[in-house]
Amino acid sequence: MKSAKAILFVLVVVGALAGAGCLGSSNASTSSEKPLAGQTITVCSGAGLMKPMNELIGMFENETGAKVEVHYGGSSEIFGILQTTCGCDVFVPGAWYYTEQAMEKGYILNDTVRNLTYHIPVIAVPKGNPKGIKSLSDLAKPGVRVVLGDPKAAAIGKVSEKILEKNGLWDKVKPNVVTFTPTVNQLLIYIATGQADATIIWEDMVTWAQSRGKIEVVQIPKEQNSIKTIPTAVATCAEKDGHLKAAEAFNDFIANHTEIWEKWGFKPWRG
């Protein structure tokens, strides 16, 4: 009987200590061990990178304790944010062109620029390829409804224009373009729903759930193509607003986790 009372007494004392927070100290120390706890950074990312970026952000937040706010948009749009409001701590556009512009204008810290993956344009068509598209020149055939990214808004739009100009097809294809979209994601919707017969899109996007089983890919020969890289860099804004350490950590994190990029259909940069 005495031993039972003793055990009961110990349980009561333990319960009281827990209620008072004495046993919570180990949890507190665990949370405080995360190196960037309490810090928040803003990432400006190309919309076509949404899938891997969402996963990488979740991993980074879990490992470091930092909070990551992200703005997805066309590369031109997020460049505008970087340029006019200093609203980006990390800048991840869909093409090197925008990083190059940011370097020239002093919007990013040049020594933090890192290539993440290759960005490979392909022709995408609805499942079954109803118009029989086999090459870039087929985009100029009468009756082919083409949708392209806006060259003034989306990285894929600028690249598509360059590819078609390179092959002497821009003026021939342009009359077939039913719309120019501000983001690459919208191109995927047009093709997956059969609202257009062909587009030029990033190869990695064919792995997205929205396109699986709904689109087919026609490769563009290397000599006709314009293969780009996706870079990441820390913005000078991060230095100004005191977020430099967290921004640099995130920049390195997304560059080092090549397995996540591969999971989502990207070809990591090996240079």
Image: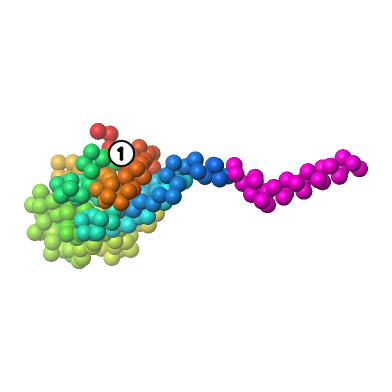
At a point 39% along the width and 54% down the height, the residue shown is 209
Give the magenta range.
1-26
Task: Residue 223 in the image: state x and y as whole percent.
Answer: 15, 41
At a point 78% along the width and 43% down the height, the residue shown is 10
At a point 32% along the width and 61% down the height, the residue shown is 189
Taking depth in this image into account, of 258 and 207 the one nearest to the observer is: 258
Place residue 118 in its image quadrant. top left
Q: Main secondary structure of the magenta part?
A: helix
Taking depth in this image into account, of 225 and 81 the one nearest to the observer is: 81
Residue at numbered disc 1: 268
- Residue 10 part of the magenta-drawn span: yes
Quadrant showing the N terminus: top right
Q: Residue furthest top?
A: 271
- From this view, report whether residue 134 is shown above or below residue 111: below
- From this view, report whether residue 270 is shown above or below residue 152: above
Taking depth in this image into account, of 180 and 124 the one nearest to the observer is: 180
Place residue 77 in its image quadrant. bottom left
Task: Residue 198 in the image: state x and y as whole percent.
Answer: 23, 58
Can the viewer see residue 260?
Answer: yes
Quadrant showing the C terminus: top left
Task: Residue 254 in the image: state x and y as whole percent.
Answer: 35, 42
Q: Is residue 44 left or right of residue 9?
A: left
Task: Residue 74 in the image: state x and y as whole percent.
Answer: 25, 57
Q: Amino acid at mark 1?
A: Pro
Q: Secondary structure at mark 1?
A: strand
Q: Give the image's coloring scheme.
A: rainbow
- Residue 54 part of the magenta-drawn span: no
Can the viewer see residue 89?
Answer: no
Taking depth in this image into account, of 131 and 98 the one nearest to the observer is: 98
Dot 1 alpha-carbon crowd within 10 angstroms: few under 14, some 14 to 19, many 20 or more: many
